[in-house]
Amino acid sequence: MTTSELSSAVRRRGDVVVVDLVGDVNRDAEAALTRAWETARRDHPAAVVLNFSGAGYINSTGIAVVVGVLARARAEGIPLRAYGLTEHYREIFEITRLADFLAIATDEDSAIGGAGGNTA
Amino acid sequence: MTALTGSLRRRLLRRPVAQDRPAVETVQPATAPEEDVAPVDIAPNDPLLAYLQSAAGAVDVTTLELDSPALGALREAGFALAVPLVSQGELIGILNLGPRRSEQEYSTDDRKLLENLAAQAAPALRVGQLVREQQAEAATRQRFEQELEVARLIQQNFLPKQLPDLPGWQVSAYYRPAREVGGDFYDVIPLPGGRVGFVVGDVTDKGVPAALVMAATRSVLRATAQRLVEPGAVLEHVNEHLVPDMPEKMFVTCLYGVLEPGTGRFRFANAGHDLPYVKTADGSEELRARGMPLGLMTGMGYEENETVLAPGDSMLLHSDGVVEAHSPAGAMFGFPRLKEAVARYPGGAELIDRVLTDLRDHTGPDADQEDDITMVTVARAARGHGGSPGGPTAQQVEFEVPSAEGNERIALARVSSIVSELGLAPERLRRLETAVAEATMNAMEHGNRYDADRPVMVRVLTRRDRVVVQVVDQGGGTPARTPEQHPDLEAKLAGLQSPRGWGLFLIENMVDEAHEHVDRSDHVLELVMFLDDPPGSETGRTTDTAPEGGADHDDQ
């Protein structure tokens, strides 16, 4: 079975930072996601948006990694949002209540707008 | 000592490594940074190696008297000194040096320094060699595992996804591949006029070649069964088709029979396969028909016979993985014992369960399965019994997943493939996949401690109204794994709970029912997904767990 290590890219759109996630969100994703968060928070963005469009398989250990990032975002007062989740993983984000703390949008513009940032 | 400060240039000898001798590496410091030093090949039987193996220290290449082609090559390449690199008594490399730049001889101090260097370098070089060897072994193992996975996928995809629903009949099937994946297959073919064809077969050999021949046989047989009525004629045609392209030393044993559900008439022909047994009111009987295996030679004829399965009768088609399973003392399970089991036990799915229990008792619980095991039962309801005997049509497939990180994806993909044609709605299939992946991760981590020698067994049972997936690990004898508290996201965000601990929570929320069973050796997590809406509407999801559970906290 092919597994795909998570890679991330961080880009700015106005005062919001978008983190593009490509690959599997599992236990091994922690390093990539932590690095991405460190880069994303550096310039005190108005919000950080996680783009899951390129994410494949997400499991419970990956959920734990996302919880870790959410905890850091809340501690630092940076709103965290997400988009690009499939219906199935969106349901999992709802069941775990991640969706209560991490607003989920249908597309990037909505995520950025909803995050209160100014689209470039 | 400029030779030692020059850039080192290492070259692995390009020669076959003798089976009984470790690789010897030449480590050749350049005599000057700008000089390029040609590698020197040393044959495994060159006397220089034996000499260096026992040399007390650095050896003067220019004055050594030895009938050795390698010695000549070293001199020709301009080397003056050879320092053996010996680790744990084995020569694993040679440090070759050119003459000193000062044109003076190497002094006693130089030699002592070089010998100290060699003593320190040798273990490091050995470690490097061992790492390379392990990497090569790991790559070989990975290729082998990938080939096995291909074979499993081929076989899995050519087994029936669903068994027919025949009023008054119960059709059950069990298939479990051996680790090396043999060539077992079975098929149930709907035929014109309500007749049903039953096939059970076995390809000699294992792995991908067997899987490919199995796939070809199954496809030809399916197509032929639609055109020809008589089972003997079907096997004749399949044989003619297979012979030209059959790989050397391979053949296929196969039993093919056609059932008329209305009358119970079962007409069959046999290509060298193990004979079926029928449970009757008087005991059990063997259904005999003669014929050579498929793919050996052209022009073969296949004897046809028939029986009538009376109300209450049950037939067992099987592969040799059952009767040829060995006990620890080397005794085979054997035909007589299987025939007796058919007579003694109820028919249908229960017969399969009872035979599997007997097999486990025979081989021992920890024995590796030697060959694929396939059983198909066809049971006719007793008179006055309107429904199917022993419950609804059932099918069971088992496979193993090595306990290694990421392998839950294998379980996910295979279960998804097995249940793909059951009509489960896509969103419910995704939920089942997630539950299977989480249950497998749980089993690999908490039950088998990621021990590669303790695989997770996944058993997929399809019933008329539901699919049941049992994920079995070897973590029995401990309390159930249900966590004491459900994960609370707010507590996790506040640092009061670990960010992990979602595994069982997800499982419970993904499937209609989840049951946990623990016995002395095994831990079983059973996932149930109804093919239609679960009984009891939306609140159909239930979880049974041992009341004393919670000591072993789920940490996924």
Image (spheres, grey):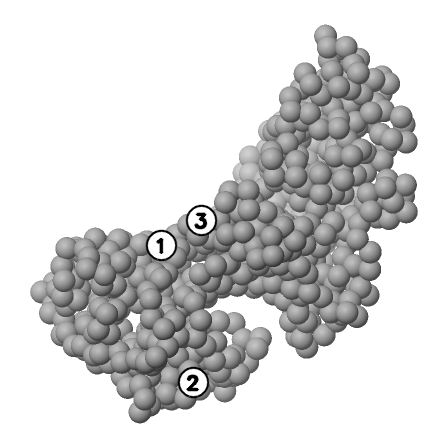
**Dot in front, 3 or 2:** 3
| Quadrant location, the N terminus of chain B | top right
Q: Residue at x 32, y 80 (%)?
A: B383
Label 2 residue SS = loop
Q: Which residue is mark 1?
A: B158
Q: Which mark is residue B422?
A: none
Q: Which residue is mark 3?
A: B423
The residue under label 2 is which amino acid type? Tyr
Q: Position of residue B378 (x, y in %)?
A: 33, 72
The residue under label 3 is which amino acid type? Gly
**Alpha-carbon span between mark 3 and mark 2:** 33 Å
Chain letter behind tag 1: B
Mark 1 and mark 3 lie on one chain; the one further toward the N terminus is 1
Q: Which mark is residue B345?
A: 2
Chain letter behind tag 2: B
Residue B336 or residue B305, whichever sits in front: B305
